[in-house]
C-alpha cells in the first residue's frame, strides 16, 4: 500500500512516498481505507524528532498523522460497534505498532473510531477529532460553571476555534484573541468579546474583567504572558506541556490529547456536534498525498486558516 513516511528525522524533504505491507486488524481493532488525513502541527514535531524517545526500539520507516477519515474495510475479532463499509473518523497514534494516518490503510483501536458526521466530506471530517478533542479536554480541565468567563488565546487556530465553539455550547462567556484580520472569523465562532492578539492580551482581558478570569485556554502558547489575565486561584490550560510554575495560586494544567484517544463517547459527541453545526470544520486546501512535504512547508510557514488535508482517495 502507498504511505507517506520517513526513515530519518529532519526537514520536510525527509517525507517520501513508501510502499508498505497492508496492516491487518487484530482483536479490538479495525482497519480503515483512508480517504483523507489532516496535517497537524504535531505531525511536524514528529517529523523533526520531537517524539523520537517514544519510538525507541521501533524500526523505521515511520508514518506520521493522527487524524484520518475513511471507510472501515476490515473488522478485528471482538468488534461489534463498527462494520465494514461504514464511513468513520479516527484518531491514530503515529508512535503505535501500526503507524499513523498518512497511509492508504491504517489499523486503529476500535475505541478510537466513530461514525463520521453525516453530510460532511472526508477532507472536512479528517480535520475534526484531534483538535476538537484537545479543546474538549482543555475545557473539561477548567471545569467552569455555566455563565463563567473563559479566555481562549489562539482563537483563530484549529484548537482555539473549537474551544470557542465548545465553550459557547457549554454556556460560558468567551473572551478570545485575534488579529484585526481574524476578528470577524472569531466572532463568528461565538466569542462574546474579541481582544487584539499579542503581548497585551492580559491587559485587554483585565480591562473587561478587572478581577481576572477563572480559566484560560492558551492556544497561542504564550504561557507566562497570559498569567496576569487569570484571577487568583484560577486555572491555565497549556497545550504543549508547559507545567508552570505560576503565581497567585494559579493552577497550570498541561494536557496531552493521547489521553482521550480511547474515549469513544467523547469522540462520538464531537462528531455529532460537527454534524449539528456546533463545530466548524475548516479545510485550508486538499493536496495530493504525494505533496506531503509541501504541505509541511506551508504549515510551518504559518498563516493558514483551517487545516491542510492529504488526499489518499
Image (cartoon, rainbow, N blue to C red):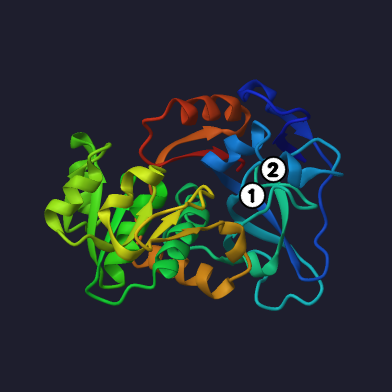
First in sequence: mark 1 vs mark 2: 1
Q: Quadrant of the C terminus?
A: top right
Q: Is residue 174 above or below residue 79?
A: above
Q: Quadrant of residue 163?
A: bottom left
Left/right of residue 202 with respect to residue 35 in the rendered view: left
Count of number-bearing discs:
2
* Quadrant location of the N terminus in the rendered image: top right
Q: Secondary structure at mark 1?
A: strand
Q: Are marks 1 and 2 in contact (CB under 8 Å)?
A: yes
Name which residue lies at 20% across and 34% down. 181
Q: CA distance from mark 1 to mark 2?
A: 7 Å
Taking depth in this image into account, of 258 and 279 the one nearest to the observer is 258
x, y percent for residue 95: 73, 48
| Quarter location, residue 5 | top right
Q: Residue at x 58, y 35 (%)?
A: 44
Q: Residues within 10 Å of mark 2 (few under 14, many from 20)?
A: many
Q: Is residue 189 visible?
A: yes
Q: Nearer the viewer, residue 45 or 26?
A: 45
Q: Which residue in the protein does label 1 denote?
A: 34
In the structure shown, which secondary structural element does the residue marked by tag 2 occupy? loop
Tell me where residue 122 appears, x and y as whole percent: 51, 51
| Residue depicted at 30% across the width and 64% down the height | 232
Report which residue position mark 2 lands on.
103
Image position, residue 236 (x, y; %): 39, 58
> Which residue corresponds to the image point at 48% horizontal and 50% vertical from the top-left?
127
- Locate residue 156, reporting x and y percent: 31, 44
Closest to the observer, 150 or 136: 150
Residue 51 falls in which quadrant of the image? top right
Judge whether residue 277 can be spotted in this image: no
Amino acid at each position: 500500500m502507498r504511505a507517506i513516511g520517513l526513515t530519518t528525522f529532519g526537514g520536510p524533504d525527509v517525507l517520501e512516498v513508501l510502499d508498505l505491507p497492508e496492516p491487518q486488524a487484530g482483536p479490538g481493532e479495525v482497519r480503515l481505507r483512508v480517504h483523507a488525513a489532516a496535517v497537524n502541527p504535531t505531525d511536524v514535531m514528529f517529523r523533526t524528532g520531537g517524539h523520537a524517545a517514544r519510538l525507541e526500539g521501533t524500526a523505521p520507516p515511520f508514518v506520521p498523522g493522527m487524524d484520518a477519515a475513511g471507510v472501515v474495510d476490515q473488522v478485528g475479532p471482538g468488534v461489534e460497534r463498527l462494520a465494514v463499509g461504514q464511513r468513520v473518523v479516527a484518531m491514530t497514534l503515529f508512535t503505535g505498532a501500526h503507524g499513523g494516518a498518512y497511509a492508504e490503510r491504517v489499523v486503529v483501536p476500535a475505541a478510537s473510531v466513530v461514525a463520521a458526521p453525516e453530510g460532511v466530506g472526508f477532507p472536512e471530517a479528517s480535520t475534526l477529532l484531534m483538535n476538537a478533542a484537545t479543546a474538549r479536554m482543555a475545557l473539561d480541565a477548567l471545569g467552569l460553571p455555566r455563565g463563567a468567563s473563559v479566555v481562549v488565546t489562539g482563537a483563530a487556530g484549529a484548537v482555539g476555534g473549537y474551544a470557542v465553539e465548545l465553550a459557547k455550547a457549554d454556556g460560558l462567556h468567551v473572551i478570545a484573541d485575534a488579529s484585526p484580520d481574524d476578528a470577524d472569523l472569531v466572532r463568528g465562532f461565538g466569542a462574546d468579546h474579541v481582544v487584539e492578539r499579542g503581548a497585551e492580551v492580559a491587559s485587554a482581558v483585565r480591562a473587561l474583567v478587572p478581577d481576572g478570569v477563572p480559566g484560560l485556554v492558551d492556544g497561542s502558547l504564550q504561557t507566562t504572558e497570559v498569567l496576569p489575565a487569570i484571577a487568583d486561584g484560577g486555572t491555565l490550560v497549556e497545550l504543549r506541556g508547559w507545567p508552570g510554575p505560576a503565581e497567585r495560586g494559579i493552577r497550570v494544567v498541561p494536557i496531552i490529547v493521547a489521553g482521550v484517544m480511547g474515549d469513544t463517547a467523547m469522540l462520538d459527541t464531537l462528531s455529532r456536534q460537527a454534524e449539528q453545526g456546533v463545530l466548524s470544520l475548516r479545510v485550508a486546501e486538499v493536496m495530493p498525498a504525494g505533496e506531503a512535504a509541501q504541505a509541511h512547508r506551508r504549515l510551518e510557514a504559518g498563516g493558514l486558516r483551517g487545516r491542510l488535508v492529504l488526499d489518499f482517495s
